[in-house]
């Protein structure tokens, strides 16, 4: 149920706003107000949202308290011509620099000679949504008829923000529904190509992990048994909040081992993130550590949401990964937890598609959109897109671990 809200301007604390009542070229919407912290906007923001919405104040405070490097936050309230709030937009502003990508991608004949120059370059990316969460749409309008103003607000903010930040890219992440093609074309936004995430849909017959294994082909049963046997000398421990606080620095170190292996890192977290996630979600967030005697080798974190579950961020000391098959055991252990808790789906994210397909994951399409400033940003995107396609291995599409009838 959508909460009610006061139409008095005093409810919207414009004294704490960065930009107030900026005119929009729109028939029904005249303004938006921008805040750089939740304190000035939380009352009206909460009133606009349905109960337990992902954009709820508690969820957004996690990152405010975490303060990830190179990211700032903005909170926008869109208003109609009578100054009544009609929608909210959550923004992350990423200062993208050499820390956020693998420099080896520049080892190409046509750019290698200017690699040192390119590494020194940086840019700003405006994200509507949350870089660190899946299925986290960054805007909400109680009335669908008010949604078309979203693109106009984003473009206006990108050019007129009070910090005078120049953005090369606007990225709209994790839209629940497709945005109208005509509106996208009018505002020069495009669909993000080939953006998929991997997900396991649990079968009703899986009442235990043994039931899951029974549905695997002989080859994958043998593989699963070998993986599970490899971790027999490891012990697992579910962390309390106190454990997470005590191990925050080590969790960050292990997380970075994984994150820094990615060719492009759209933002990096720190150990405080896991502390704040546990404080916020409590029993709906779990961190499990993998120990060899008293040495923490790896961890996995999980988010639980009704009948869905997500294997969130993980961390691995890769010196031990091959011996103990840690990554694959994290996937299997997550599947066991989902079965025990009678979940229907497990979200596994966008990376390592081959490994996840081998466990039974299938792709789901994500609705993401982007706008590029003409010139160098467009050229850079085209270069990275071609490079990405050249590196993409579609072999995962052929992996199906489940047996056919009679096998």
Image (tube, rainbow, N blue to C red):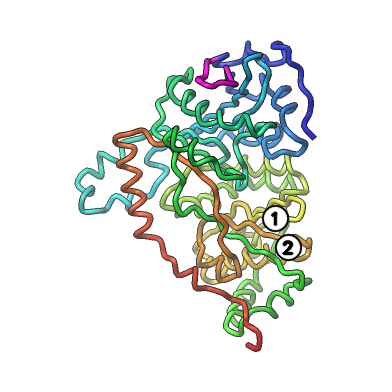
Q: In which quarter of the image is the N terminus?
A: top right
Q: Quadrant of the C terminus?
A: bottom right
In the rendered image, residue 15, in percent from the top left (x then y), is placed at 63, 11
Mark nearest the camera among 1 and 2 is: 1
Mark number, residue 309 = 1
Dominant SS in magenta: loop
Q: Residue 147 falls in which quadrant of the image?
A: top right
Which residue does the image show at 68% across and 37% down from the upper left?
Answer: 59
In the rendered image, residue 372, in percent from the top left (x then y), is placed at 39, 36
**Of 238 and 144, the residue lying toward us:** 144
Q: Looking at the image, which residue sits at the far bottom?
A: 406
Mark number, residue 365 = none
Q: Is mark 2 on a helix, strand or loop?
A: helix
**Residue carrying label 2:** 337
Side of 299 where 280 appears, left or right: right
Which residue does the image show at 54% across and 42% down from the upper left?
Answer: 173
Q: Do the residues labelled 1 and 2 touch (CB within 8 Å)?
A: yes
Start and end of the magenta stretch? 22-30
Q: Residue 371 falls in which quadrant of the image?
A: top left
Mark 1 and mark 2 lie on one chain; the one further toward the N terminus is 1
Which residue does the image show at 46% across and 35% down from the upper left?
Answer: 170
Q: In this view, does 317 lie above or below 140?
A: below
Side of 385 where 200 appears, left or right: right
């Amino acid at each position: 149920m959508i909460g009610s809200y006061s139409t008095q301007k005093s409810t919207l604390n414009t004294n704490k706003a960065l930009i107030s009542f900026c005119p929009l070229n729109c028939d029904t919407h005249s303004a938006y107000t921008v805040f750089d912290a939740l304190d000035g906007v939380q009352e009206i923001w909460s009133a606009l949202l349905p109960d337990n919405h992902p954009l709820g104040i508690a969820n957004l405070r996690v990152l405010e308290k975490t303060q990830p490097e190179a990211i700032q936050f903005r909170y926008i309230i869109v208003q109609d011509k009578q100054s009544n709030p009609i929608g909210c937009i959550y923004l992350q502003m990423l200062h993208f620099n050499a820390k956020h990508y693998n420099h080896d991608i520049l080892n190409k004949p046509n750019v290698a000679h200017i690699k040192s120059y390119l590494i020194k370059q940086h840019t700003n990316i405006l994200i509507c949504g949350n870089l660190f969460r899946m299925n986290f749409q960054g805007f909400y309008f109680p009335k669908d008829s008010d949604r078309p103003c979203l693109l106009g607000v984003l473009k206006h903010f990108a050019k007129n923000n009070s910090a005078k930040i120049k953005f090369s890219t606007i990225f709209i992440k994790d839209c629940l529904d497709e945005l109208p093609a005509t509106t996208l074309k009018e505002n020069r936004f495009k669909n993000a190509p080939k953006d998929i995430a991997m997900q396991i849909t649990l079968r009703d017959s899986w009442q235990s992990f043994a039931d899951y294994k029974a549905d695997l082909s002989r080859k994958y049963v043998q593989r699963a048994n070998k993986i599970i046997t490899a971790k027999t000398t490891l012990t697992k421990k579910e962390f309390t909040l106190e454990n997470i606080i005590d191990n925050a620095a080590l969790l960050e170190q292990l997380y970075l081992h994984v994150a820094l292996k990615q060719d492009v890192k759209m933002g990096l977290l720190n150990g405080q993130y896991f502390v704040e996630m546990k404080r916020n979600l409590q029993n709906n967030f779990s961190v499990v550590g993998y120990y060899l005697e008293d040495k923490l080798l790896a961890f996995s974190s999980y988010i639980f949401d009704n009948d869905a579950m997500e294997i969130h961020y993980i961390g691995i000391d890769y010196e031990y990964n091959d011996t103990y098959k840690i990554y694959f055991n994290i996937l299997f252990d997550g599947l066991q937890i989902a079965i025990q808790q009678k979940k229907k789906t497990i979200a596994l994210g966008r990376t390592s598609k081959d490994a996840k397909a081998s466990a039974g994951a299938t792709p789901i399409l994500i609705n993401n959109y982007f706008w590029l400033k003409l010139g160098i940003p467009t050229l850079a995107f085209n270069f990275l897109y071609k490079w990405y396609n050249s590196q993409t291995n579609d072999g995962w599409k052929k992996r199906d671990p489940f047996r056919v009838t009679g096998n």
